[in-house]
Amino acid sequence: MEINRYLVESALLTHGLKSISNEELINRWKSDRKNIAWVDNGNVIIGGIEEFAEFRKNSDSLIRIDCYQLEDAVKNKKSGALTASGTMKVCEREGIKLAITCGMGGIGDIIGEELCPDLPALRDIHVALISTSPKDMLKIDETIDWLKENDIRVVSKNSNRCSGYIFNSADVEIEKVDDLSYESLTNKLLILNGIPNDKRVNDLSILEKAIQNGKEAEKQGRYYHPAVNAKIDELSRGYSSEIQLDSIIANVELAEEICYK
Protein backbone atom coordinates (compact mmCIF):
# COMPACT_ATOMS: atom_id res chain seq x y z
CA MET A 1 0.00 0.00 0.00
CA GLU A 2 1.29 3.45 -0.94
CA ILE A 3 2.42 5.51 2.03
CA ASN A 4 0.47 8.73 2.67
CA ARG A 5 2.42 11.85 1.78
CA TYR A 6 -0.22 14.23 3.18
CA LEU A 7 -3.19 14.22 5.58
CA VAL A 8 -6.45 16.18 5.40
CA GLU A 9 -7.95 17.87 8.46
CA SER A 10 -11.48 16.94 9.48
CA ALA A 11 -12.75 19.99 11.39
CA LEU A 12 -14.26 21.76 8.38
CA LEU A 13 -15.68 18.51 7.00
CA THR A 14 -17.25 17.70 10.38
CA HIS A 15 -18.57 21.04 11.64
CA GLY A 16 -18.23 23.63 8.88
CA LEU A 17 -20.32 22.47 5.93
CA LYS A 18 -23.86 22.86 7.23
CA SER A 19 -25.62 22.41 3.87
CA ILE A 20 -23.54 19.46 2.66
CA SER A 21 -25.04 16.04 3.37
CA ASN A 22 -22.93 12.93 3.85
CA GLU A 23 -24.16 11.61 0.52
CA GLU A 24 -23.15 14.77 -1.30
CA LEU A 25 -19.79 14.82 0.48
CA ILE A 26 -19.03 11.26 -0.65
CA ASN A 27 -20.19 11.94 -4.21
CA ARG A 28 -18.18 15.13 -4.64
CA TRP A 29 -14.99 14.00 -2.90
CA LYS A 30 -12.49 13.21 -5.65
CA SER A 31 -9.77 11.36 -3.75
CA ASP A 32 -9.95 7.64 -3.05
CA ARG A 33 -6.96 7.76 -0.69
CA LYS A 34 -7.29 7.01 3.00
CA ASN A 35 -5.83 10.29 4.22
CA ILE A 36 -8.47 12.12 6.29
CA ALA A 37 -7.50 12.27 9.97
CA TRP A 38 -9.77 12.29 13.04
CA VAL A 39 -9.92 10.89 16.59
CA ASP A 40 -12.47 8.25 17.58
CA ASN A 41 -12.63 7.12 21.21
CA GLY A 42 -8.98 8.05 21.70
CA ASN A 43 -7.80 6.37 18.52
CA VAL A 44 -6.25 8.47 15.76
CA ILE A 45 -7.95 7.30 12.58
CA ILE A 46 -6.60 7.89 9.07
CA GLY A 47 -9.34 6.83 6.68
CA GLY A 48 -11.20 7.46 3.47
CA ILE A 49 -14.26 9.57 2.79
CA GLU A 50 -16.86 6.83 3.30
CA GLU A 51 -15.44 5.78 6.67
CA PHE A 52 -15.22 9.45 7.67
CA ALA A 53 -18.85 10.06 6.64
CA GLU A 54 -19.96 7.44 9.18
CA PHE A 55 -18.00 9.28 11.86
CA ARG A 56 -19.47 12.62 10.71
CA LYS A 57 -23.01 11.41 11.48
CA ASN A 58 -22.27 12.16 15.14
CA SER A 59 -20.97 15.68 14.45
CA ASP A 60 -23.12 17.29 17.16
CA SER A 61 -21.31 15.32 19.88
CA LEU A 62 -17.78 15.64 18.45
CA ILE A 63 -15.22 18.09 19.81
CA ARG A 64 -12.55 20.04 17.93
CA ILE A 65 -9.00 18.88 18.65
CA ASP A 66 -5.95 21.06 18.06
CA CYS A 67 -2.27 20.21 18.48
CA TYR A 68 -2.31 21.04 22.20
CA GLN A 69 -5.40 18.91 22.88
CA LEU A 70 -4.40 15.80 20.92
CA GLU A 71 -2.51 14.04 23.71
CA ASP A 72 -5.39 14.53 26.16
CA ALA A 73 -7.95 13.36 23.58
CA VAL A 74 -6.00 10.13 23.04
CA LYS A 75 -5.33 9.55 26.73
CA ASN A 76 -8.93 10.17 27.79
CA LYS A 77 -10.55 8.37 24.85
CA LYS A 78 -12.30 11.41 23.41
CA SER A 79 -13.77 11.68 19.92
CA GLY A 80 -13.39 14.69 17.69
CA ALA A 81 -12.36 16.35 14.48
CA LEU A 82 -8.81 17.53 13.98
CA THR A 83 -8.07 21.16 13.20
CA ALA A 84 -5.16 22.20 11.00
CA SER A 85 -2.71 22.17 13.91
CA GLY A 86 -4.06 18.87 15.22
CA THR A 87 -3.58 17.33 11.79
CA MET A 88 -0.05 18.72 11.61
CA LYS A 89 0.71 17.03 14.93
CA VAL A 90 -0.54 13.69 13.60
CA CYS A 91 1.54 14.22 10.45
CA GLU A 92 4.63 14.79 12.57
CA ARG A 93 3.99 11.58 14.50
CA GLU A 94 3.51 9.63 11.27
CA GLY A 95 6.51 11.12 9.46
CA ILE A 96 4.29 12.90 6.90
CA LYS A 97 5.53 16.20 5.47
CA LEU A 98 2.26 17.95 4.51
CA ALA A 99 -1.14 18.73 6.05
CA ILE A 100 -4.23 20.09 4.28
CA THR A 101 -6.78 22.52 5.67
CA CYS A 102 -9.18 25.10 4.23
CA GLY A 103 -9.76 28.25 6.29
CA MET A 104 -7.04 28.43 8.94
CA GLY A 105 -6.80 30.23 12.25
CA GLY A 106 -4.79 33.31 13.01
CA ILE A 107 -4.83 36.42 15.19
CA GLY A 108 -8.20 37.70 16.35
CA ASP A 109 -10.48 38.29 19.32
CA ILE A 110 -11.86 34.76 19.59
CA ILE A 111 -11.84 33.53 23.19
CA GLY A 112 -8.95 31.11 23.65
CA GLU A 113 -7.74 31.74 20.10
CA GLU A 114 -6.31 35.24 20.31
CA LEU A 115 -3.31 33.46 18.82
CA CYS A 116 -4.75 30.36 17.17
CA PRO A 117 -2.68 27.15 17.63
CA ASP A 118 -2.35 26.94 13.84
CA LEU A 119 0.28 29.70 13.98
CA PRO A 120 2.69 28.27 16.57
CA ALA A 121 2.14 24.88 14.92
CA LEU A 122 3.58 26.29 11.69
CA ARG A 123 6.54 27.60 13.68
CA ASP A 124 7.17 24.55 15.86
CA ILE A 125 5.91 21.43 14.05
CA HIS A 126 8.08 20.09 11.23
CA VAL A 127 5.21 19.86 8.72
CA ALA A 128 4.18 22.13 5.83
CA LEU A 129 0.55 23.27 5.47
CA ILE A 130 -1.72 23.96 2.50
CA SER A 131 -4.55 26.35 3.37
CA THR A 132 -7.02 28.42 1.41
CA SER A 133 -6.48 31.50 3.60
CA PRO A 134 -6.74 32.67 7.18
CA LYS A 135 -10.44 33.08 7.96
CA ASP A 136 -12.17 36.38 7.19
CA MET A 137 -13.18 37.18 10.77
CA LEU A 138 -9.50 37.31 11.75
CA LYS A 139 -6.92 40.06 11.37
CA ILE A 140 -5.42 38.61 8.21
CA ASP A 141 -2.75 41.29 7.85
CA GLU A 142 -1.53 40.78 11.43
CA THR A 143 -1.69 37.00 10.96
CA ILE A 144 0.57 37.05 7.92
CA ASP A 145 2.87 39.58 9.59
CA TRP A 146 3.21 37.20 12.57
CA LEU A 147 4.04 34.31 10.26
CA LYS A 148 6.71 36.29 8.43
CA GLU A 149 8.19 37.61 11.68
CA ASN A 150 8.52 33.99 12.83
CA ASP A 151 10.38 33.00 9.66
CA ILE A 152 7.45 31.12 8.16
CA ARG A 153 7.42 31.34 4.38
CA VAL A 154 3.95 32.22 3.00
CA VAL A 155 3.62 31.35 -0.70
CA SER A 156 1.06 30.78 -3.44
CA LYS A 157 1.19 29.44 -6.98
CA ASN A 158 -1.76 31.59 -8.05
CA SER A 159 -1.22 35.09 -6.68
CA ASN A 160 1.10 37.44 -4.82
CA ARG A 161 -1.80 38.64 -2.66
CA CYS A 162 -3.88 37.08 0.11
CA SER A 163 -7.27 38.71 -0.33
CA GLY A 164 -9.41 36.74 2.12
CA TYR A 165 -11.15 33.40 2.51
CA ILE A 166 -14.89 33.22 1.71
CA PHE A 167 -15.05 37.00 1.21
CA ASN A 168 -12.76 39.53 -0.45
CA SER A 169 -11.83 40.86 2.96
CA ALA A 170 -8.09 41.59 2.82
CA ASP A 171 -5.18 42.58 0.59
CA VAL A 172 -1.84 41.36 1.92
CA GLU A 173 1.31 40.71 -0.06
CA ILE A 174 2.67 37.16 -0.15
CA GLU A 175 5.28 35.34 -2.23
CA LYS A 176 4.23 33.93 -5.61
CA VAL A 177 6.12 30.80 -6.65
CA ASP A 178 6.26 29.06 -10.02
CA ASP A 179 6.76 25.52 -8.82
CA LEU A 180 6.26 23.39 -5.73
CA SER A 181 7.58 19.87 -5.38
CA TYR A 182 7.54 17.17 -2.74
CA GLU A 183 11.29 17.57 -2.34
CA SER A 184 10.86 21.29 -1.66
CA LEU A 185 8.47 20.77 1.26
CA THR A 186 9.98 21.96 4.52
CA ASN A 187 8.77 23.01 7.93
CA LYS A 188 7.85 26.67 8.36
CA LEU A 189 6.07 26.65 5.00
CA LEU A 190 2.47 27.81 4.41
CA ILE A 191 1.06 27.34 0.91
CA LEU A 192 -2.07 29.41 0.22
CA ASN A 193 -4.51 28.35 -2.50
CA GLY A 194 -7.25 30.96 -2.51
CA ILE A 195 -10.81 30.64 -3.72
CA PRO A 196 -11.10 32.56 -7.03
CA ASN A 197 -12.18 36.12 -6.22
CA ASP A 198 -15.23 35.96 -8.49
CA LYS A 199 -16.50 32.83 -6.70
CA ARG A 200 -16.56 34.39 -3.22
CA VAL A 201 -19.47 35.85 -1.26
CA ASN A 202 -19.71 39.56 -2.10
CA ASP A 203 -21.88 40.87 0.73
CA LEU A 204 -19.57 41.78 3.63
CA SER A 205 -22.60 42.49 5.85
CA ILE A 206 -23.06 38.71 5.98
CA LEU A 207 -19.63 38.45 7.58
CA GLU A 208 -20.56 41.05 10.19
CA LYS A 209 -23.75 39.15 11.10
CA ALA A 210 -21.85 35.86 11.23
CA ILE A 211 -19.26 37.31 13.62
CA GLN A 212 -22.11 38.43 15.90
CA ASN A 213 -23.48 34.89 15.79
CA GLY A 214 -20.05 33.52 16.71
CA LYS A 215 -19.85 35.87 19.69
CA GLU A 216 -23.28 34.74 20.89
CA ALA A 217 -22.11 31.13 20.62
CA GLU A 218 -19.05 31.95 22.75
CA LYS A 219 -21.28 33.41 25.45
CA GLN A 220 -23.27 30.18 25.48
CA GLY A 221 -20.15 28.03 25.74
CA ARG A 222 -20.42 26.77 22.17
CA TYR A 223 -17.75 26.71 19.44
CA TYR A 224 -17.17 30.01 17.64
CA HIS A 225 -16.11 28.83 14.18
CA PRO A 226 -19.01 26.43 13.47
CA ALA A 227 -21.47 29.14 14.56
CA VAL A 228 -19.91 31.64 12.16
CA ASN A 229 -19.91 29.12 9.33
CA ALA A 230 -23.52 28.18 10.01
CA LYS A 231 -24.69 31.82 9.84
CA ILE A 232 -22.75 32.48 6.62
CA ASP A 233 -24.25 29.29 5.19
CA GLU A 234 -27.75 30.41 6.18
CA LEU A 235 -27.41 33.95 4.81
CA SER A 236 -25.75 32.79 1.59
CA ARG A 237 -28.37 30.05 1.16
CA GLY A 238 -25.80 27.29 1.31
CA TYR A 239 -23.39 28.86 -1.15
CA SER A 240 -20.58 29.31 1.37
CA SER A 241 -20.59 25.59 2.17
CA GLU A 242 -20.41 24.81 -1.53
CA ILE A 243 -17.35 26.95 -2.15
CA GLN A 244 -15.60 25.75 0.99
CA LEU A 245 -16.05 22.13 -0.05
CA ASP A 246 -14.80 23.03 -3.54
CA SER A 247 -11.82 24.76 -1.91
CA ILE A 248 -10.69 21.91 0.32
CA ILE A 249 -11.05 19.57 -2.68
CA ALA A 250 -8.86 21.98 -4.69
CA ASN A 251 -6.32 21.95 -1.85
CA VAL A 252 -6.25 18.15 -1.96
CA GLU A 253 -5.72 18.32 -5.72
CA LEU A 254 -2.79 20.71 -5.18
CA ALA A 255 -1.35 18.27 -2.63
CA GLU A 256 -1.66 15.48 -5.19
CA GLU A 257 0.21 17.61 -7.72
CA ILE A 258 2.98 18.39 -5.25
CA CYS A 259 3.32 14.95 -3.70
CA TYR A 260 2.75 12.47 -6.51
CA LYS A 261 3.45 14.14 -9.87
Image: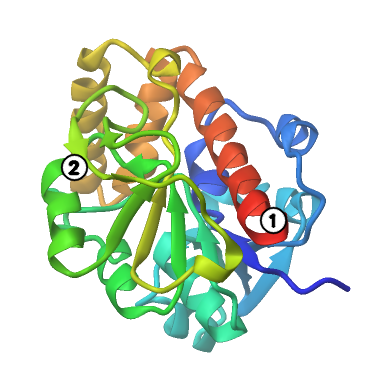
Q: Residues within 10 Å of mark 2 (few under 14, many from 20)?
A: many
The residue lying furthest to the bottom in this view is 75
Determine whether 230 is above or below 142 in the image.
above
Quarter of the image with the C terminus is bottom right
On the picture, is 111 further left or further right than 40? left
Residue 53's spot in the image, x, y percent?
73, 48
Residue at x-position 32% and y-position 49%: 222
**Image coordinates for residue 137, horizontal then vertical, percent:** 21, 36
Asked whether, in this view, residue 48 is left or right of residue 144, the answer is: right
Foreground mark, 1 or 2, reads: 2
Relative to 204, 191 lies left or right: right
Q: Is residue 91 visible?
A: yes
Q: Name the residue carrying label 2.
A: 140
Q: Find residue 55 and name its label.
A: 1
Q: Secondary structure at mark 2?
A: helix
Q: Quadrant of residue 149?
A: bottom left
Q: Residue at x 48, y 39 (%)?
A: 16
The N terminus, quarter of image: bottom right
Amino acid under disc 2: Ile
Q: Furthest-right residue in view? A: 1
Give the amino acid at mark 1: Phe
